[in-house]
Image (cartoon, rainbow, N blue to C red):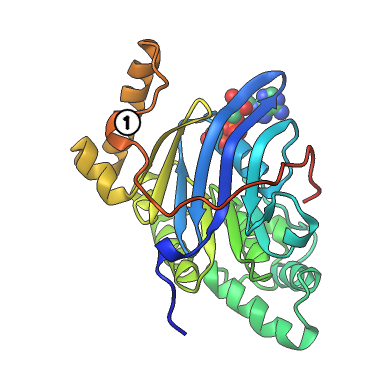
Amino acid sequence: MRKKPPEERSAAISVVGLGVVRGGRTIISGLDVEVPTGSVVGLLGPSGSGKTTLMRSIVGVQDKVSGTVEVLGLPAGSPALRRRVGYVTQDASVYGDLTVWQNLDYFASLAGVPSRGRKGVVGKAVDDVGLGGHEKQRVGTLSGGEMSRVSLAAALVGDPELLVLDEPTVGLDPVLRRDLWSTFRGLAEGGKSLLVSSHVMDEAVQCHRLLLLRDGALVADVTPERLLAETGAPDAERAFLTLIDEANAAAEEGGDGRTPGAAPEPGPAAPATTASVPEEGTR
Ligand SMILES: Nc1ncnc2c1ncn2[C@@H]1O[C@H](COP(=O)(O)OP(=O)(O)OP(=O)(O)O)[C@@H](O)[C@H]1O
């Protein structure tokens, strides 16, 4: 069957008019975001700009949320999404007293992988995150970067349609980062959708699109190529700084902080979003 080009596919994530209050403070306000199916979308922004809060809203675990968030065509946090969405937080969420293999075998069983196919699934996930040779090591004895890769592998074994990854490459060396990004792009080529937050600009340019947040608002929704062309910056890091500086200046002048040159590009029409976000999810 012919693979549909991105503009013909429905959005994996559609966020319309999102507002989030945390600790009595508005963290996100009036945010519209779309992640096309089969793409890797990078979520960038200064520390505290709301990246994790947006991800939490998308996977349905964020409290005090308004607006609509639709994930794979369902309201965020719907029980039916549990096996279809993989969420990897910044903190490793695996069992320190089990080995790498035991952890992944366990998460694969939770994800419904039948026992006869589990060895292959777990082995592939171990390879995908570059943990070959550590299978029998207790997770509690791994380095921080290794431990976070076990968390990522635990999400991969379930073969989710959407992966939401909060800074998955923190603490990894350049070779591992390159290999992981190649894995992410391979997953997208296979039809998966990925939303990946990062502070590392040289890796962010490997995304199909970039979303740049500042103070809980979207400053840019742009391809890496257009980001460089619009800002005239020599590299992605300086392009990012240019946009943030421009947005800060616009905010000081009383604007909304959105950089005119990097306004969202025309893309596929957002699907109707009628579902409301639950107050608190269970994932
Ligand atoms: N439980 C909470 N109560 C009050 N404020 C919170 C809470 N959690 C987060 N915040 C605030 O919300 C804002 C956005 O936080 P968030 O973690 O989403 O940012 P981020 O862009 O992911 O940051 P980083 O890049 O540092 O991980 C920050 O100002 C943070 O202090």
- Asked whether 275 or 152 is in front, the reply is 275
Q: Which residue lies furthest to the top in this view?
A: 253
For mark 1, give the secondary structure.
helix
Q: Is residue 151 above or below residue 103?
A: above
* Residue 68 percent location from the top left of the image: 65, 41
* Residue 143 percent location from the top left of the image: 60, 54
- Asked whether 279 or 249 is in front, the reply is 279
Q: Give the residue at mark 1.
A: 243
Q: Does the residue labelled 1 lie within 8 Å of ligand 1?
A: no
- Tell me if 283 is positioned left or right of 211 in this view: right
**Neighbours of disc 1 within 10 Å: few (<14), some (14-19), many (20+):** many
Total labels drawn: 1
- Tell me if 59 is positioned left or right of 38 in this view: right
- Residue 169 seen in the current view: no
Image quadrant in which you'd find residue 138:
bottom right
* Residue 200 percent location from the top left of the image: 40, 44
Query: Who's the residue at 80% across and 69% down the image?
Result: 110
- Residue 7 seen in the current view: yes
Image quadrant in which you'd find residue 135:
bottom right
Query: Who's the residue at 18% across and 38% down the image?
Result: 232
Q: In this view, does 87 lie above or below 190?
A: above
Q: In this view, does 6 lie above or below 74?
A: below
Query: Who's the residue at 44% across and 65% down the image?
Result: 8
* Residue 222 percent location from the top left of the image: 35, 45
Q: Which residue lies furthest to the bottom in this view?
A: 116
Image quadrant in which you'd find residue 127:
bottom right
> Ligand 1 sits in which quadrant?
top right
Query: Who's the residue at 40% across and 11% down the image?
Result: 254
Which three-letter amino acid code belongs to the residue tagged 1? Answer: Leu
